[in-house]
Image (cartoon, rainbow, N blue to C red):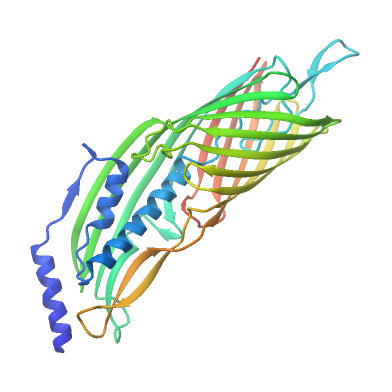
Amino acid sequence: MTFRRLSITLLALCALASAAPVRAQSQGQSATDIVGFLMLNQAVPTADFERDRAAADAARQTIVDALLVNLASVPLSTSSGGFVYRFNEQLGTAERAADTFGPFFVERALTAGRGHASFGLTASTSSFDELDGKKLRDGSLLTIANKFRDEPAPFDTETLTLRIRSSGMTLFGSVPVTNRLEIGAALPLLRLELDGTRLNVYRGATLAQATAAVTASGIGDAAVRGKYTLVDVDGFGFAAAGELRLPTGDSDNLLGAGKAGYRISALGSYEPSRFALHANLSAAGGGVSNEVSVAAAALAAVNPRVTLSAEMLARRVSELRDLDFVAAPHPTIVGVDTYRLVAGDGGNTAVQVVTGVKWNVAGTVVLGGHVQWSTTHSGLTSKITPTLALEYAF
């Protein structure tokens, strides 16, 4: 063994011998504190504290932002009612103007019609498996490593295991002021469960460097919405919409953005009879991140009581960043490179697909269910997110 290998071996063994696993629980600590605790408890010797701290802070913030994008700024269920009514002058009464019961996330351009308010709730749960395409649950997420340049694999590594589950219920409602103007609101109730382990492995010797767990629950960021239908002719509709996200959620526990956000949208719909097409173009700012999004939905009324729906949501989010490894020479040991997990520049695009069904159980009660999954690896992703929805229209 050469002197340089002997020196770093002794240094690493001393660190392993003296270190003890550090544990943190949720008492007095927020979810943000726990993520920072797991990222900053480092045992791999690099002799460059400032660079280690900067890389750990950047990776921690990337994970926090990815959580906030999925928890605090994720599109909420549409507040548009499942039933659309228009006054029939020949019959002298209101009648349904569309046979479908509307999308789950994509906003329709038509309002429900004056006097036809609606409200409902959705319930969903997600278990996140990947962060930027990197596995979270199998212990393979490398955070820092030392590697001799003439060896194929690092000899000293630290990996992070994260188990993250989010469950939520969203209450929503809408009130058409006129046949063209509709106001609505949505209030998410969230629960976040997060636990993690950081492992140090030196030449096959494993040490649990840090473990932590936290559970947080409460209201998320409430949304207030408005929509005005500009065109409503023979099934064609075009509308302008706005949404204000209020900072009602606890940002330290990743239940809210910590500041107000807004979204402005252009909505287009074509609802002739047994099928419907909807498209939304939106821009958002404030809150967690700036964002540009495109959404589309296709619906089919297979019978008067059942509607099938397929939706696509694409979001370009400025704070959704890549996680990459950057190598730098070890400052004190010749022939060794240190690999650090750092955040990239610029935003990423997240694309999700939603398929579901709505069933008119009785009267104006609609029961719905859908599954949602990601087609990209940007940010935090789960294999599948199931959701149940219930809506009642007056």
Viewer-side residue, 99 vs 76: 76
**In the image as oriented, which residue stretches furthest toward the top?**
92
The location of residue 81, given as percent across then percent down, is: 66, 25
- The quadrant where residue 78 appears: top right
- Please indicate whether residue 83 sits to the left or right of residue 187 in the image: right
Residue at image point 66% right, 14% down = 394
Can residue 101 be seen from the camera position used here? no
Q: How many marks?
A: 0
Viewer-side residue, 186 vs 390: 186
**134 lies above or below 300:** below
**285 lies above or below 173:** below
**307 lies above or below 133:** above
- The quadrant where residue 88 appears: top right
Residue at image point 63% right, 39% down = 264
- Please indicate whether residue 194 sits to the left or right of residue 273 in the image: left
Q: Quadrant of the N terminus?
A: bottom left
The location of residue 276, given as percent across then percent down, is: 76, 37
The location of residue 145, given as percent across then percent down, is: 28, 71
- Please indicate whether residue 19 sits to the left or right of residue 170 in the image: left
Can residue 252 be seen from the camera position used here? yes
Residue at image point 28% right, 76% down = 154
The location of residue 121, given as percent across then percent down, is: 53, 26
**In the image as oriented, which residue stretches furthest toward the right?**
90
- The quadrant where residue 99 appears: top right
